[in-house]
Image: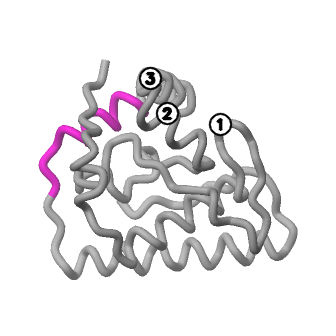
Amino acid sequence: MAVVDVSRAEVWAVKRDKHDKVMSDLIRCRADWKCERCNCEYPPGRRGGLECSHFYGRSKQSTRHYPDNLSSFCTGCHMHLGKVARDKYEMFIRMELGPDRFDALVQRANTVYKITKAEKEERYQHYRAQFKYMERRRKEGAIGWLDFVAWD
């Protein structure tokens, strides 16, 4: 079983940047702008209540921008799973990923992660291009879950 520290101080202490924004857009677009738990839809112009949730908090650099650590949840589901029912969140992630990918996520979360500024910018450009491609696919009529290529 994974041990996850989700203290309020950790959650609010980490500032969002352009890297977080592109990942948030990418994860929510991947889920077709729907909550992955309750399936509530967020059409264009009404996407404010759909959030990118981190199973392991944003302070863990090894998983901060790692797709298997990120989910698209409405505010209600995000609050419920992130604060009230952490055990249900872990169950949800285990079911979504399967045992091998979940174990790999746990291992990655417990690994020291170093990244240079150049690599960080390369990762940003990669995910930005993936998001633009995904947006284009949505405009062409693609519906449902769309996978994308992870940077690493």
The disc, 3 or 2, on the residue closer to the chain's N-terminal end is: 2
Q: Which residue is mark 2?
A: 81
Q: Which residue is mark 3?
A: 99
* Residue toward you, 105 or 48: 48
* Residue toward you, 101 or 49: 49
The disc, 3 or 1, on the residue closer to the chain's N-terminal end is: 1
Q: Is residue 109 above or below residue 20?
A: above
Q: Nearer the viewer, mark 2 or mark 1?
A: 2
Which disc, if any, is residue 37?
A: 1
Residue 10 rendering spot, x and y as whole percentages: 23, 49
Which portion, as a residue range, is magenta?
Answer: 101-113
**What residue is shown at x 61% (from left), y 59% (from top)?**
28
Report helix, strand or loop for mark 3.
Answer: helix
Contact between marks 2 and 1 (CB within 8 A): the answer is yes
Report helix, strand or loop for mark 2.
Answer: helix
Q: Is residue 88 above or below residue 123?
A: above
Q: Is residue 62 above or below residue 21?
A: above
Q: Is residue 137 left or right of residue 95?
A: right
Residue 100 rendering spot, x and y as whole percentages: 41, 27
- Residues packed near mark 1 inside 10 Å, few (<14), some (14 to 19) or many (20 plus): some
**What residue is shown at x 77% (from left), y 53% (from top)?**
41
Q: Is residue 101 above or below residue 67?
A: above
* Residue toward you, 24 or 12: 12
Which kind of residue does numbered mark 1 sit on?
Arg
Q: CA distance from mark 2 to mark 1?
A: 10 Å
The disc, 2 or 1, on the residue closer to the chain's N-terminal end is: 1
Residue 113 rendering spot, x and y as whole percentages: 16, 55
- Quarter of the image where the N terminus is located: top left
- Inspect the magenta stretch and tell me whether residue 110 lies in it: yes
Residue 19 rendering spot, x and y as whole percentages: 38, 73
- Residues packed near mark 2 inside 10 Å, few (<14), some (14 to 19) or many (20 plus): some
